[in-house]
Amino acid sequence: NAGVMQNPRHLVRRRGQEARLRCSPMKGHSHVYWYRQLPEEGLKFMVYLQKENIIDESGMPKERFSAEFPKEGPSILRIQQVVRGDSAAYFCASSLGTLTGANEKLFFGSGTQLSVL
Amino acid sequence: GENVGLHLPTLSVQEGDNSIINCAYSNSASDYFIWYKQESGKGPQFIIDIRSNMDKRQGQRVTVLLNKTVKHLSLQIAATQPGDSAVYFCAENMEYGNKLVFGAGTILRVKS
């Protein structure tokens, strides 16, 4: 009964490198959300995807950040040419349906801690 | 720009006492509210939720109260235990929306 799986748990990158963060939603869930958390802050919404489609990317920086959720395989959050300010915990969450549905809940993974040197 | 962390409010309670964590939400169009618990190094864990057509909902040792008039949400934890120590976040979802907006969080420290 696996929950939302994220890997790697910790990722260290040097400035200018690319970071790829992976998220496998709970079994049967087709809605994926990415959030970012800085130390001692709340989670900030980045992007919401439903299989193969980006539904809402209003929280994504316009440059260097992209996300995908292919038909097969995990969702990927990609950060190109990382800078120190990208250092944060990145959490993925999934739901079975849309959050407007009755009894719909959002389940979070354990996150990926990205450190940019 | 540079990201500056904020100091989260802290609630310290004695083991066995009741805890009340408060949250003010901003959007009157929000119709779904959730409380999450986050322990160090872990992802947020669902505690309890409530829809806007209710003003109170009870779970095991937890109660959520919703006051839509003043846009206020609270989480009550009965007989607080050391394992309850964590950061607690409220989150809201706008009507017809599909993303949760999180509050800043409150640190709960339980003294034995």
Image (cartoon, coloured by chain):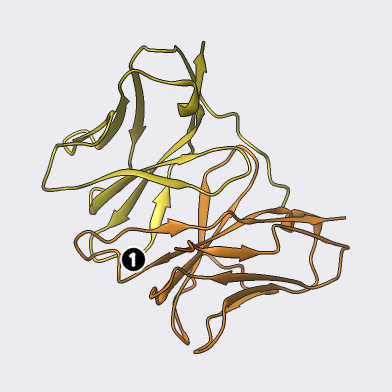
Chain colours: A orange, B yellow
Residue A41 in view of the camera: yes
Residue at 32% from the left image edge and 58% from the top image edge: A105
Q: In this view, does B103 lie to the left or right of B68?
A: right
Q: Is residue B24 left or right of residue B108?
A: left
Q: Is mark 1 on a helix, strand or loop?
A: loop
Q: Give the residue type at disc 1.
A: Asn
Residue sitting at 22 percent across and 59 percent down? A103
* Residue B88 picture quarter: top left
Q: Is the residue A88 above or below the residue A50 in the image?
A: above
How many C-alpha atoms fall within 10 Å of the one at disc 1: few (<14), some, or many (≥20)? some
* Image quadrant where one finds the N terminus of chain A: bottom left
- Residue B27: image location, x then y, percent: 29, 48
Q: Which chain carries label 1?
A: B
What's the residue at 60%, 34% (across, down)?
B6
* Visible residue check, residue A63: no
Q: Quadrant of residue B41?
A: top right
| B102 w.r.t. B21: above or below | below
Q: Give the answer, above or below, for where A56 lies relative to B85.
A: below
Position of A18 compared to B38: left or right?
right
- State the image coordinates of residue A5 (x, y, percent, origin top left): 56, 64
Percent position (x, y) of residue A19? 75, 70
Q: How many labels does the image show?
A: 1
Q: Which of A89 and B26 is in front in this view?
A: A89
The quadrant of the picture occupied by the C terminus of chain A is bottom right
Residue A116: where, in percent of width, then height? Answer: 82, 57
Which residue is nearer to you in this view: A34 or B41? Answer: B41
The residue where tag 1 is placed is B98
Outermost residue, left side: B53
Residue sitting at the far front: A1
